[in-house]
Image: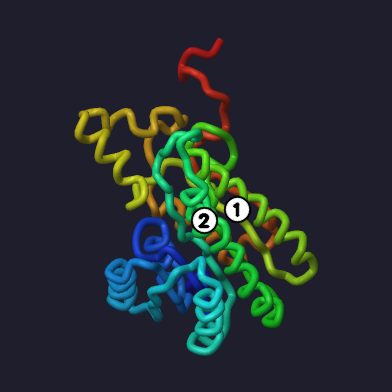
Amino acid sequence: MGRLDKKCALVTGAGSGIGRASAKLFAQEGAKVLIADVNQDGIEQTKAEIEEAGGTVIAARVDIADEENVKGLIDRCALELDGLDVIYANAGISGGRVPLLEGSPEEWLEILRINLIGPFLAIKYGAPRMVANGGGSIICTASVAGLRSGAGATPYSASKAGVISLVQTSANQLAGTKVRVNAICPGLIETGMTKPVFDRAREKGTENKIGQLNPLKRAGEPIEIANTALFLASDESSYVNGQAIAVDGGLSSSHPVVLGHMA
């Protein structure tokens, strides 16, 4: 018996990385999944892998920050999957590493649109469905960059701090409805978004330094975030609400120090 048997889940940003790993794991654990991404090839690949493993899946190529698109996704879950129990609002962009004083309002707006407005819309349209069904779990991908400085460029970090606040305020706005809202704050995970970081390290021969600032001294893998998402999606986390859970090898547990040189 799977941990998500009889549940229906929507996963955004499922065309690669964390979203793909999570969608596959959700399906493996018994959920019927609707996967969404702007990347057509990526979303079809994820769909094929889930179907090959015997899972039930619907794929949609959409802009997850477009209100009508999101409303349509929620409606499809209810109509084609017979319900909506879990939303994993995972889709996001990094926006690059433009210095603070060189950034433009247009760049900021696009990052905030995808990273913050997208999750807001998922909550706006998903929560009422879940309330009507007697409850559910909404999960958003934030970042350790949203907890404190040093893990991302300013607009990206601000957008992820916004996601954490959105999760906390939404959990309280939905008090008494049995709809839980939580965030996952990944550290450095090898995905399509972080590929340039890993590629540069490999080109320079410094791959062994990736993740050196966290106590585990390594980068994470998408499945390690997916495992946390599975916990939050399942009934095992029934008393976890309004939280921003760091999955970062311990990076956010410390102020900046030279490891091994503390008195």
Residue found at x 66% / y 76%: 130
Q: CA distance from mark 1 to mark 2?
A: 8 Å
In x, y percent, where is residue 247? Answer: 51, 45
Q: Name the residue tied to disc 2.
A: 115
What residue sits 67% from the left and 64% below the top? 180
Q: Tag 2's secondary structure?
A: helix
For the residue pair 246 and 36, the one nearer the viewer reads as: 36
Q: Nearer the viewer, residue 72 or 228?
A: 72
Is residue 10 toward the left or the right of residue 56 in the image? right
Residue 263 sits above or below residue 46 on the image: above
**Eyeballing the image, is 255 above or below 124?**
above
Who comes first in sequence, dot 1 or dot 2? 2
Query: Horizontal and vertical percent for residue 67?
Result: 55, 73
Give the residue displayed 73% in from the left and 70% down from the top: 178
Q: Amino acid at mark 1?
A: Val
Question: Which quadrant is home to the C terminus?
Answer: top right
- What is the residue that sits farthest to the right in this orientation? 176
- Is residue 7 visible in the rendered structure shown here? no
Mark 1–mark 2 CB contact (< 8 Å): yes
- Residue 27 placement (x, y as % from top left): 42, 72
Q: Position of residue 135 (x, y in %)?
A: 68, 74
Q: Which residue is mark 1?
A: 163
- Answer above or below: position of 248 versus 88: above
With respect to residue 154, does 9 lie above or below? below
Q: Is residue 242 left or right of residue 74?
A: right
Residue 233, image quadrant? bottom right
Name the element at disc 1: helix
The kind of residue tagged 2 is Asn
